[in-house]
Structure formats: C-alpha cells, structure tokens
Amino acid sequence: MKIVTLLENTARRPGLAAARGLSLYVETDRRKVLFDMGPDASFLDNARALGIDLAAVDAAVLSHGHSDHGGGLAAFCAVNRGASIYLRREALGAYYAVLPGQEPNYIGLPETAELAERFVFTGEWETLDGGLTLFSGVEDERTLRAAAPKLQEKTEAGFRPDGFAHEQHMLVEEKGKTALLAGCGHLGIVNILRAAERRLGRRPDVVFGGFHLFELNPEDPEAVALTGATAAELAKGTTLYYTGHCTGDWAYARLKEALGDRLRPMDCGASAEL
C-alpha cells in the first residue's frame, strides 16, 4: 500500500505547487483511490510531476463538503471519465464561514449538477471492494473537538452550527496493514481514531490527514488542554501520523514533543508505504 500527498498547504519539493487544501492518492494491489481534490486543479499538475496517472483511478472519495477539499472535483472528472465519487449526501449543503460584522463567506462545493451521475452517496459504514471502508457518524466527545464556531450551514431557517454530518473518513486494509485517511478531522482526530479502532479492534498503522487545530490560541488554557489531551491520546500505541493542512504550526510542534518521529509532515509529495 502506498499513500502520497498530491496537494497540501506546503510544498518543500521543487516543482510541486502548494495550495490551501488537501488531496491524497492511495494505491494498493487492488485499488487506486483519490481522496479529496484540493481547492482547484493544482493536484493534477502535482500528480503528473510525481508520475501518478489519475486517469487510472478507480474510485474517488470526498471527505466533506468544503471547497478546499472538493474545489477540484470537476477538474478530476475531466481527466477521469469512469471513477465513481463517494460522498455524503450532506456534502452538497450550503456551508459558510460566518464571523460577526462580516458577510458570510461561502466555503461549500462549487456547482456539482453536471457531475451528479458520478456520485455515490454513502451511509455511516460503507464497505467497498478491495479493502476500503468509508465511515462517518463518529461519536463526538466535544472536549476533543477544535472546529471553530464560525463554520456554519445555511438552511431555510437561517444559519446554524455545522454538525459535520457531511464528513467521512476512509480505512484502507491490505496484507494485515491499515491506513486511516481523514480530511480535516472537524469532529476531533481522537474521536475519529477511536471510531476506527472500534471497527478494526486495534489502532491503524498510519494516519494521513488534517487535525483542525490551526485556529487554537496558545494563550487559551482550553486550547492548551485540548492539544495536550490530543497528544496524549495519539502517543498511545505505535501508529505513525502524517499531518498538516489544518493542523497548524503551534499544534504540530506540541504534538511533535509527544510523538517524536511518529509525527511527520504531510506536505506535497510526502509518501508512506506499508
């Protein structure tokens, strides 16, 4: 099994573009999967530079309905004519960043009507061929969740806090090894990890994804406590963690203190083989 970061906020390798968002590629003996498509078509150029043929992808997964993960959806469909796109039906909702005194900023997906025939809507647990499992409905212990209250959904009754029913995660199992992919981890990476552990009966061998800790204020005692609790939980076991995107530099440094070499940057071109 191989996992490659096609696009992320940071590119340390020459010749790769960076953009705020995420796109990951997973290849096993049986499947080639694209997990998220970044904010635009930049991930396509990076894939070519890395020698990855996205026309050969046989399944695409959208982790949630925000444009920094699904803005490149149409670009992917233009180069890959056959892969189904697995997403939560709720990912098609109207999602905004809402701040006091400012106009709400739309952060949902671009228009998707022309792509609808490619969509496969997923439930809380979906087992796909080739060792793939998609899951949502994570038990939400809110003390382990760092998603900002500005993230909201627009409904007929007005704006309401986003409950992240549109968020899903992926397990990839092959030859006794398991990877967990999480787009932003809005519901808390620890909550997601625990849900995966209940499914597997053990922790995954590797995790790729954003942990959504970037907006924490290091002067806030609650933020310090949340990051400490996250670090303590992730330190259990032997799992390797590749993270970036929405994790944030301060939180990454705190996690690094607890995890050492088990925490690695998920910048463009980063890869792991199991």
Image (spheres, grey):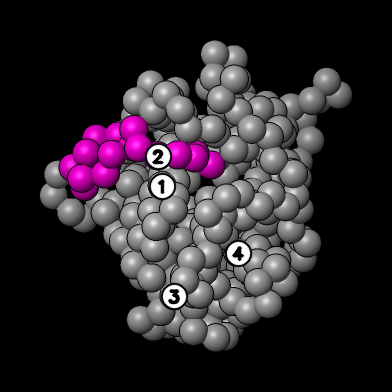
Closer to the chain start, of discs 1 and 2, is 1
The image quadrant of residue 94 is top right
Q: Which amino acid does label 2 sit on?
A: Val
Above-or-below relation of 88 to 198: above
Of badges 2 and 3, nearer the viewer stands 2
Q: Which amino acid does label 1 sit on?
A: Lys
Closer to the chain start, of discs 3 and 1, is 1
Q: Name the residue under label 3.
A: 240
| Magenta-drawn stretch contains 59 | yes
SS type, badge 4: helix
The image quadrant of residue 144 is bottom right
Give the spatial CA distance, label 3 vs label 4: 13 Å
SS type, badge 1: strand
Closer to the chain start, of discs 4 and 1, is 1
Above-or-below relation of 231 to 216: below
Segment colored magenta: 44-61
Give the spatial CA distance, label 2 vs label 3: 25 Å
Q: Name the residue under label 2.
A: 57
Q: Name the residue under label 1.
A: 32
Residue drawn at x 22%, y 39% as measured from the top left: 48
Q: What residue type is labelled 4?
A: Ile
User: What crowding class fits label 1: few (fewer than 14 Cα within 10 Å), some (14-19), or many (20 or more)?
Assistant: many
Q: Who is closer to the viewer here, 95 or 150?
A: 95
Residue drawn at x 49%, y 84% as measured from the top left: 238
Closer to the chain start, of discs 3 and 4, is 4
- Asked whether the viewer can see residue 16, the reply is no
Q: Mark 4 points at which residue?
A: 189
Residue drawn at x 20%, y 45% as measured from the top left: 51
User: What crowding class fits label 4: few (fewer than 14 Cα within 10 Å), some (14-19), or many (20 or more)?
Assistant: many
Q: Where is residue 248 in the image (x, y as percent from the top left)?
A: 44, 59
Q: Quadrant of the N terminus?
A: bottom left
